[in-house]
Image: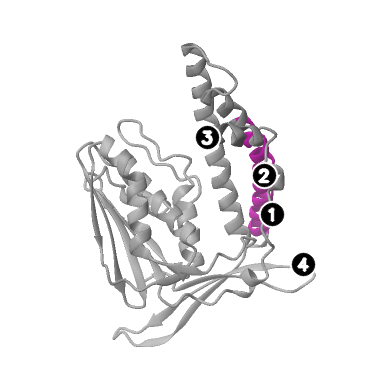
Amino acid sequence: TNQFEFNRIARVTTPQRAVFGVKGRRVRDAEGREIGWLIQIRDITQSWEAERFRNEVLSVASHELHTPLTSMYDAVSLLVEGPLGDLNEKQFQLVSLLQSDIERLTRLVEELLDVTRYESADYPLERRQTLDVTRTVSQVIDKLQYRAARKGLSVVTLVREDLPQLRGDRDRLIQVLENLLDNAIKFTPVGGVIEIGARVVGRSVQIWVRDTGVGIPQEHQAWIFEKFARLHTDDGEESGHGLGLSIAKAIVESWGGQISVESKPGQGSTFRFTIPIRPARESKARREATPAVVRAADASPYAAEVSRSNAH
């Protein structure tokens, strides 16, 4: 096989601060016996620095956008919910449309922040809490069941009750599941079936989401987990901003797991990811990661008014 078994980035402590990409795979003879390793070392300093600069720009821009978007959303919510006075039908339609657009932009900003945090290794340590996979899957299905039902989709659950409890971040698991199920709902035609399951495979818990949707062409599967990878269907449906699967991959790999896809056009898709039962030890880079930025400024001047109106 030509597939590499490991892929790492190494930074050399020199005045030039060179960065190298290191890949390797075992080499076997005609009888399958291991006879050595093939190692590929490539200088990626320029591309590494360009990528880091781009991520820094995205991170700063996203943070700067988040605060005004929060203020805009809170202000519009006051208009929609009525504490400032009733709107006529036309005004309500326009303000509701504005609220929907703000929500969409806010989701995009949050996704951009997630991407840059994971790629820069500055993401804060995830909470290590008891992770009940069975219960978490059930909660995610309950949340998305209405959307599936509106489209006439059946949701089948095949989650074993005897799964071991893990240590991890429940919110991140929910994020991965929601990304996968959201795509399944979006790309499965009316009357289709979505299956979500979980089982123990070796020293990992494997979770999968299978659908009877439009499927993904083979040539697209190689980059489906890349940033801004967007799929289109014959009816013009698009896969959001193209960040959901990239974020899911970053989260799963931060656990020491793997994520993959199997699909054929017209026959649906199956996404699988694993969570190690014994989570890998936190890397030194993550232990020394920069603490998360506290978003004290995100509290908009309208937030207190929204809270008061919701209390009535």
The type of residue carrying mark 3 is Glu
Which mark is drawn over residue 16? 4
User: For the residues marked 4 and 1, what is the alpha-carbon distance in whole angstroms?
Assistant: 30 Å
Residue at the image position 33 percent from the left and 48 percent from the top: 142
Asked whether the residues under the numbered discs 2 and 4 touch, taking CB atoms below 8 Å apart as contact, a structural biologist would say no
- Crowd class of label 3 (few under 14; some 14 to 19; many from 20; radius 10 Å): some
Residue 74 part of the magenta segment: no
Residue 69 part of the magenta segment: yes
Residue at the image position 55 percent from the left and 31 percent from the top: 102
Magenta stretch, residue numbers: 46-72
Which mark is drawn over residue 293? 1
* Residue 188 percent location from the top left of the image: 27, 41
* Residue 269 percent location from the top left of the image: 28, 51
User: For the residues marked 2 and 3, what is the alpha-carbon distance in whole angstroms?
Assistant: 16 Å
Asked whether the residues under the numbered discs 1 and 3 touch, taking CB atoms below 8 Å apart as contact, a structural biologist would say no
The type of residue carrying mark 1 is Val
- Crowd class of label 4 (few under 14; some 14 to 19; many from 20; radius 10 Å): few
Q: Nearer the viewer, residue 105 or 240?
A: 105
Q: Is residue 62 above or below residue 7?
A: above
Q: Is residue 103 above or below residue 143?
A: above
Q: Closer to the camera: disc 2 or disc 4? A: 2
**Residue on which the image places disc 2:** 63
Q: Closer to the camera: disc 4 or disc 1? A: 1
